[in-house]
Structures are given as C-alpha cells and as structure tokens.
Amino acid sequence: MTHCPDVALPTHAPRDLSLQDAVDVLGSATSVTVLCHVQPDADTIGSGLALAAVLKRQGIPVQVAFASPSELPVSMRDLPGVDLLCPVDDVADEVDLLVAVDCGSAGRLGSLASRLAGARRSLVIDHHRSNTRFGMFNLVDDAAESTTAVLAQLFDVWGVPIDADLAHCLYAGLVTDTGSFRWGQAGTHTLAERLLATGIDGGAISRRLLDTHPFGWLPMLGAVLSTAVLVPDAADGRGLVHAVIRCTDSAGLGAEEIESVIDIVRTTAEAEVAAVFKETAPQSWSVSLRSKASVDVAAVASGLGGGGHRFAAGYTADGPVDTVVAALRDALG
C-alpha cells in the first residue's frame, strides 16, 4: 500500500481516525514501534503484542516495549509474541510509525515518550475517555471495554483473521479490563465467545492473570488491609474506604501484586469509592481509585492530574500521606 499524502505529513494537527483510516496508516508503515504504558497491565501488553504480531505477519519490521519496570510481570510471560518485546535501550530512536496502545497521555509512556520526537508519524489506539489525543493520529473509542476490543474491530476492518494466538492476547485485555466481566456491556460476551471459539483456554488465562500470586502477597495483604479506613461521610455521604501500601510492605513483590489490592478494598459494602495509596518513593504516591455505580472516578482523577475510566482511574501525588488523602476527600466532596 502506498502512503496517502494526508497520512504522511507530520505537520498536520492531531486527527481522530476511523477504523479504516487507522488500517491505512498501519498498512502503509515501513517500520513500527509499538509502545505500552508503564507498569503494564494485560490490556496494554495484549494490545501491543497482538498488533505487533499482525504487523510482523505482513512483513513490516516491528518492535514492542514499555519503559518500566525492567521485566514483564510474571502473569503475562506466557502471552504469544513476547519474543517481540525489546529492552528500553534497544528501542529505535527513529521510526516511520510509533503506535501507543492503551495510553491516555504521553506521560504514561514514561521515559519512552522521548521516542515520539523521532517518529515520522504517531498513532494512539486507546479506549480511555480521558485520552489527551497526543498522537498525530488517534483511534480512541471510549465506549469499548478494552483497547484489545478496539483492536478486534480494527482487525476485522483490516481483514485480519483472529487465530488462537491473537485471541489469547485480545482475551487477556478483555477479561482484565472488565474485571472478569463484572463490568461487561452489550457485546462484551459476544466478543469473548468469539475469542474462546478459537480454542483458547479462557479459564486458564483468567487464573494466570487474576488469581495467581506468590505466597509473599498474603502477608503484604494482611499488613495493608490493617491500614484500611472507612470514611462514611465522604463522597457526599456515599462513603470512601482507603488503604496505604508502603514500600516496606511490598518489598520483593511485583507491580501486579500491588495493583491487585484495590480489588480487595473495593469490596467494602459501606463505601461507594475505594482508594489505595501506593508509595513509590518517600512522599510520592500512585493512587488507584474504584467506584461502584454513582461516582465518576475518572473525573475525580482528572482533577488531580490523572485519568482513567468512569469506575476505575488513578493519579500520582506527592506529599505526606495524610495530605494526599485529604486532597482526595476534598475532590470527592
């Protein structure tokens, strides 16, 4: 496929693309770097590997990377295509097309955000409502359950058959971003059925990603849950529950063990909103937010410099933990 003039010019203002436009951009690429977000989850990695696999099959040179941590979380190491991942230092400084998957902002690329400057063109594929459209081209469907669900639609328009390897990657993002289908919507189970029909073992994929932790997770969980505080009058009387994870609590554990705590805290019946404050350095915090039905935590997180989904979002903050908690309470009302 030849380059279209309106696609190739890097001086154009950021533009939202249709699925077909995105296929044209991808199909015209002569080299591609696919970047996943820092502290990667199964949606960004599954999306990155699935897209890279399709590009490789079409003879387009491609590499996939994420800035941090230095190693892929254990639960994702059996995803097809992990051999396409490359270390940060090996990511090309210049490339025809850079694709960011499941990234709401350039900051989510971490140190690899610098590669945007060396890309002739850039394309963002995402499903976060708070996406900043930081690419030259942007395919953002905030109605999609996951970025892998966006890619499933993209592959259909592209005429790419979804085989078991692609389905494995796509299902990984779908099952995690829907909380094992607790936040499913019309079409979610239809897509899941289609992916499962390729012969993948959905139960094994889910267990690997969501229900498997090292023994050290248990004492960490005990220590963290002992810090939990219920604030019934927060969020206009709908309730907030929060807990704190110190570096000393999580020493030796991976990011996925740390991230899993929010899904335990959020089960509190008396609170509409749950928050976990994760210490990343002295007086530096990564905050995970969840809500059940009536609070848009993406809007709350955006007001505090972050973003995400209506019922799952996050942001970073600095200062004493009491100050950071107070700021969240003020934002919730």
Image: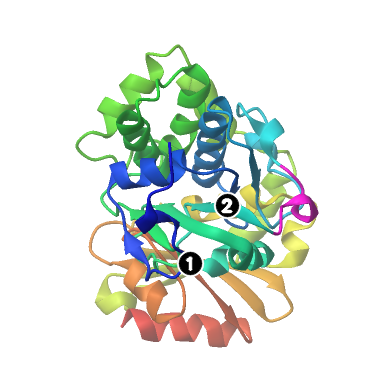
Which of 200/57 is in front? 57
Distance between mark 2 and mark 1 Cα atoms: 20 Å
**Which element carries disc 2, helix, strand or loop?**
strand
Residue under the image location 72 percent in, 38 percent down = 214
| Amino acid type indicated by mark 1 | Ser
In which quadrant is the N terminus drawn?
top left
Q: Residue 180: x, y in percent?
A: 40, 36
Q: Would you say 228 lies left or right of 330 here?
A: right
| Left or right: 187 in relation to 10 | left
Indicate the secondary structure of the residue bearing disc 1: loop
**123 over 227 or under it: above or below:** above
Label 1 CA crowd tier, 10 Å (few <14, some 14–19, many 20+):
many
- Indicate the position of residue 203 as horizontal and vertical percent values: 48, 21
Residue farthest to the left, as pictured = 186
| Position in image of residue 188 (x %, y %) | 28, 34
**Magenta stretch: residue 59 in it?**
no
Looking at this view, is 4 or 247 the one in front? 4
Q: Residue at x 37, y 31 (%)?
A: 155
Q: Is residue 54 left or right of residue 142?
A: right
The location of residue 272, given as percent across then percent down, is 32, 63
Magenta: main secondary structure: loop
Residue highlighted by disc 1: 105
Q: Which residues are magenta?
A: 86-93
Q: Is residue 25 above or below residue 113?
A: above
Tell how many labels: 2
Q: Amino acid at mark 2?
A: Asp
Crowding around mark 2 (Cα neighbors within 10 Å: few <14, some 14 to 19, many 20+) is: some
**Tell me, what colour scheme is on the image?**
rainbow
For marks 2 and 1, the one nearer the N-term is 2
